[in-house]
Amino acid sequence: MSSTYGENIRLSIFGQSHSPAIGMTLEGIPAGSRIDFDRLYRFMERRAPGKNEYSTARREKDMPEFISGLVGDTVCGAPLTAIIRNTDTRSQDYSGLRVLPRPGHADFTAQMKYGGAQDYAGGGHFSGRLTAPLCLAGGICLQLLAGEGISVIARIASVADVDDEGELSESLAEKSFPTVSDKRGALMRERIAAARAGGDSVGGVVECRVLGLPAGLGDPMFGGMENRIAAIVFGIPAVKGVEFGAGFSAARMRGSVNNDPFCVRDGRIETLTNNCGGILGGITDGMPLTFRVAFKPTPSIARAQRSVNMETLEEQTLEIRGRHDPCIVPRALPCVEAAAALAVYDALLGRKKEAR
């Protein structure tokens, strides 16, 4: 099934944007693991809509209701299942989309695959709303990784044509707009505001780092850490690209520049640079695992766009109603952290099984 992920843990995400609830089932979490609910809710709050001028006006509490897998705050060994109720829906805003697909959305391809049976309100199962249960599962894994001395941090690396400055070295979770440079962050917000005022949208890039990883996680070829992370990150709507370490810029380097020379620091083998992004041959080398995720501009914009009536095959002008983010990047950042945490924790459990 396309809405499941994992090898040593198994995540299933269910629901639609305007269904009574969305949710997740997470299997494989070791019995006896404890969940700090306050910490989990604070993490999910970072993704929640309706918090500022650059997010959708839709307001959801995103308060999960655990229906199995817990006794108090402790995982009991049964599948961990939780739902998040949808309360602030306006399905009437999407009434015309049954036959008139939105450019940049999955409306047309969903029609081709499901033949009209799909739920088109709010984007149905294709909606970014489904990242709420992703963050719920990932937030749990973030806590489990922290117990192993592993942290996952991220920043807004760019919005439109504005890049952040400085190095990502610590968590920016307490910042309302998580950039290293506040000055560059202010310029990014100006780009978002200008796009919104013009009835348009902008995209950007999120950079994520996993710190404290041991060497030896992952597998060659199809089970590599790049594969594991990319598979779940591409489940976040609007993702168009993922690169690790130096990424595509490595294609312009010579081998003498791109190669990361080995050295010894404090009795440990490390590398002087980290162009590989902490991964060699699909396996972590003990350096920070670094990757970047490119997000396209939000496809729902206020400007009139061309579309085609799927029943009559007549070209028509589409004006989208509803509530949408002029830039998805700020709310997508914790989704990237959650996805990384799930992939890394899955690999960590696999490594522990191998060591038995």
Image (cartoon, rainbow, N blue to C red):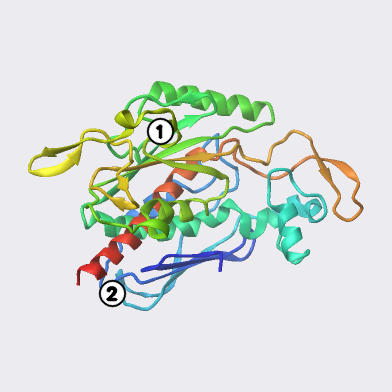
Kind of element beneath mark 1: helix
Find residue 355 and report its horizontal and vertical position in percent: 20, 68
- Residue 141 visible (yes or no): yes
User: Could you tell me which residue is drawn at 59 percent across and 58 percent down?
Assistant: 87
Q: Quadrant of residue 351?
A: bottom left
321 or 126: nearer the eye?
Answer: 126
**x 53%, y 46%: residue:** 49
Judging by the rendered image, the residue that carries numbered circle 2 is 31
Residue 158 in picture, x, y percent from top left: 47, 30
Q: Which mark is residue 334?
A: none
Q: Secondary structure at mark 2?
A: loop
Residue sitting farthest toward the front: 255
Question: Is 43 left or right of 148, judged from the image as shown?
Answer: right
Q: Is 237 left, or right, of 257 in this rendering?
A: right
User: Looking at the image, which residue is at 48% across and 22% down?
Assistant: 187
Residue 326 sits in quarter = top right
Between label 1 and label 2, give the one nearer the viewer: 1
CB of mark 1 within 8 Å of CB of mark 2? no
Q: Residue at x 78, y 35 (%)?
A: 304
Query: Mark 1 = which residue?
Result: 250
Amino acid type, residue under disc 2 in the picture: Ala
Picture layout, residue 97 above or below residue 304: below
Residue 41 in the image: x percent, y percent? 39, 55
